[in-house]
């Protein structure tokens, strides 16, 4: 018998009930719930509150809803009138262009953007906005980010959700040396993949950099949370893989702000841990 | 004997609604699609608009405007991604506009706070249930507006990410808001 001594937080229980946790975390929460009666009772309490609220919400409003028939007929008549009106040139154009046409145009635009980005990296850009704001940000000349030719389907298939593979010690020491860290303290850094392996990043030295914990607000915990979020967005089809890779490689702090809609690291990510510290 | 010939169905509709009926052609696939979405989402959207303080007739008008806008949106070839989320976002914005326009009129929310007759036979059970619902509604009314919106959108089936888009909040803020509101409801419910 196992005695779990750290309970799942109330918010994590709610997120688990809501199906809003990442797949990795849900496995952990389920394992805890299987072992812990206290948390199961708390989870049941959350579910009961949701049921009570929904019943109250619907039973207080549904009896006052107008019947559907009349409004529906009016709506259909308005729609028919609108549909019968002559489409504008823009509508005419939109109705005749297929999704494939739009996809081709999007692909062409993405290709141009990637080429521009590669040219910028090759010509040795100065420090990025992230680096000026945070000296611990990756140096784009040393760590431009490297990817392997994988598709979203390859990356999001089951069994691809393990932690990032450990970096060999010799490679790690080379990375520290390149960044001028002569005697790295164990567990003070995460040897981070700039583009995480679950987003197609490789273990090439040009994709690795030493990211400190807790020396700056934009630390490895926040970066881990961003990687987790991007993986979810890519696998759900909300963000395409190339965009996720480009955003994280160009300026991961800007990417964090963009994908979490915030200017500061969120408090709930202060202890977020996905990858292991280097030791 | 009938002296006046009966109006055909489209004329009757025009007289009733003041809307000119279109020629009776077969609806286009786009009309069919938008009507399907209207049938599917009218009640959840209307309920949400009522929680914003709109009366049921005002809410129904806004629902119509939302789906007419959806038709235009799709006809213009704009994004088809997550149309229910789009519908709620437009409904939220139009609903707030309508509420401000109707400011001064009695808010429907106070009507919504009344608990309807409970058909269960046991009077004691009825009384307990109504008391609990009244208590929960009081807690909901006391929530900050943003928390209330999050809770109501969630009750209508939106996921956190969609709620964040509708209300222009971060995902974390939505999560915290719903957590906070449920904790208050749980306390009020004796949890």
Image: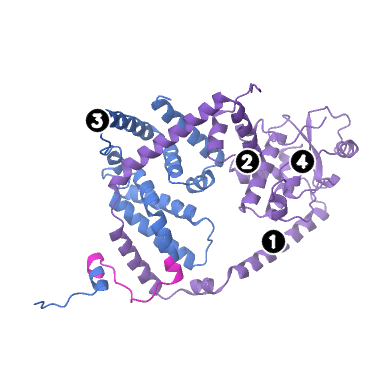
Chain colours: A purple, B blue
Residue B187 percent coordinates (x, y): 42, 25
Which quadrant of the rendered structure holds the C terminus of chain A? top right
| In the image, residue A216 above or below residue B47 | above
Residues at discs 4 and 3 both on one chain: no
Residue B169 percent coordinates (x, y): 52, 43
For label 1, the residue is A110
Residues at discs 1 and 2 both on one chain: yes
The total number of labels drawn is 4
Depth order, front residue of B158/A93: B158
Q: Pointer 4: residues within 10 angstroms few (<14), some, or many (20+)?
A: some
Q: Chain of mark 4?
A: A
Q: Chain of mark 2?
A: A
| In the image, residue A61 above or below residue B41 | above
Residue at disc 4, secondary structure: loop
Residue A237 percent coordinates (x, y): 62, 54
Span of residues in magenta: B14-32
Tell me if residue B120 is in the magenta stretch. Answer: no
Residues at discs 2 and 3 both on one chain: no
Residues at discs 4 and 1 both on one chain: yes
Depth order, front residue of B153/A29: A29
First along the sequence among labels 4 and 2: 2
Q: Please tell me whether mark 2 or mark 3 is closer to you in this view.
A: 3
Image mark for residue A81 = none
Q: Pointer 1: residues within 10 angstroms few (<14), some, or many (20+)?
A: some
Q: Please tell me whether mark 4 or mark 3 is closer to you in this view.
A: 3
For label 3, the residue is B123
Residue at disc 1, secondary structure: helix
Query: Gap between marks 4 and 2, in whole Å?
Result: 16 Å
For label 2, the residue is A22
Image mark for residue A164 = 4
Q: Residue at x 25, y 70 (%)?
A: B14
| In the image, residue B185 above or below residue A197 | above
């Amino acid at each position: 018998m196992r005695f779990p001594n750290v309970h799942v937080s109330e918010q994590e229980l709610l997120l688990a009930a809501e199906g809003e946790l990442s797949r990795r975390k849900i496995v952990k929460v389920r394992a805890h719930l299987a072992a812990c009666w206290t948390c199961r009772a708390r989870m049941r309490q959350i579910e009961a509150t949701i049921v009570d609220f929904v019943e109250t919400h619907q039973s207080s409003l549904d009896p006052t809803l107008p019947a559907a028939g009349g409004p529906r007929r009016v709506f259909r008549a308005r729609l028919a009138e609108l549909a019968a009106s002559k489409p504008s040139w823009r509508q005419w154009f939109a109705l005749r262009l297929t999704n494939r046409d739009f996809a081709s145009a999007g692909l062409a635009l993405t290709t141009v953007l990637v080429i521009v980005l590669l040219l910028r990296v090759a010509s040795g850009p100065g420090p990025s906005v992230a680096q000026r704001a945070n000296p611990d940000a990756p140096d784009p000349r040393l760590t431009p980010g490297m990817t392997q030719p994988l598709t979203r389907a390859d990356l999001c298939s089951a069994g691809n959700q393990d932690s990032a593979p450990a970096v060999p010690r010799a490679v790690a020491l080379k990375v520290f040396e390149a960044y001028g860290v002569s005697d790295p303290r164990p567990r003070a850094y995460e040897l981070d993949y700039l583009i995480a392996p679950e987003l197609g990043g490789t273990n090439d030295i040009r994709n690795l950099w030493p990211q400190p914990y807790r020396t700056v607000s934009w630390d490895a915990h926040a970066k881990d949370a961003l990687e987790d979020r991007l993986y979810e967005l890519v696998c759900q089809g909300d963000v395409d893989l190339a965009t996720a890779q480009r955003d994280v490689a160009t300026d991961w702090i800007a990417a964090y702000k963009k994908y979490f809609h915030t200017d500061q690291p969120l408090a709930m990510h202060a202890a977020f841990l996905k990858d292991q510290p280097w030791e | 004997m009938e002296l006046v010939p009966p109006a055909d169905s489209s004329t009757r509709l025009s007289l009733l609604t003041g809307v000119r009926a279109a020629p009776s052609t077969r609806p286009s696939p786009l009309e069919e699609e938008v009507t399907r979405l209207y049938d599917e989402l009218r009640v959840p959207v209307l309920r949400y608009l009522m929680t914003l303080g709109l009366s049921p007739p005002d809410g129904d008008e806004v629902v119509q405007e939302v789906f007419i806008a959806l038709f235009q949106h799709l006809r213009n070839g704009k994004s088809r991604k997550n149309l229910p989320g789009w519908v709620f976002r437009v409904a939220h914005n139009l609903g707030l506009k309508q509420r401000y326009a109707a400011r001064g009129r009695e808010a429907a929310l106070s009507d919504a706070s009344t608990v309807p007759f409970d058909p269960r036979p046991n009077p004691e059970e009825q009384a307990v249930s109504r008391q609990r619902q009244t208590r929960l509604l009081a807690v909901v009314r006391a929530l900050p507006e943003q928390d209330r919106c999050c809770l109501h959108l969630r009750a209508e089936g939106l996921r956190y990410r969609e709620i964040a888009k509708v209300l222009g909040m971060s995902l974390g803020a939505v999560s915290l808001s719903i957590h906070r509101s449920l904790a208050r409801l749980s306390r009020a419910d004796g949890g």
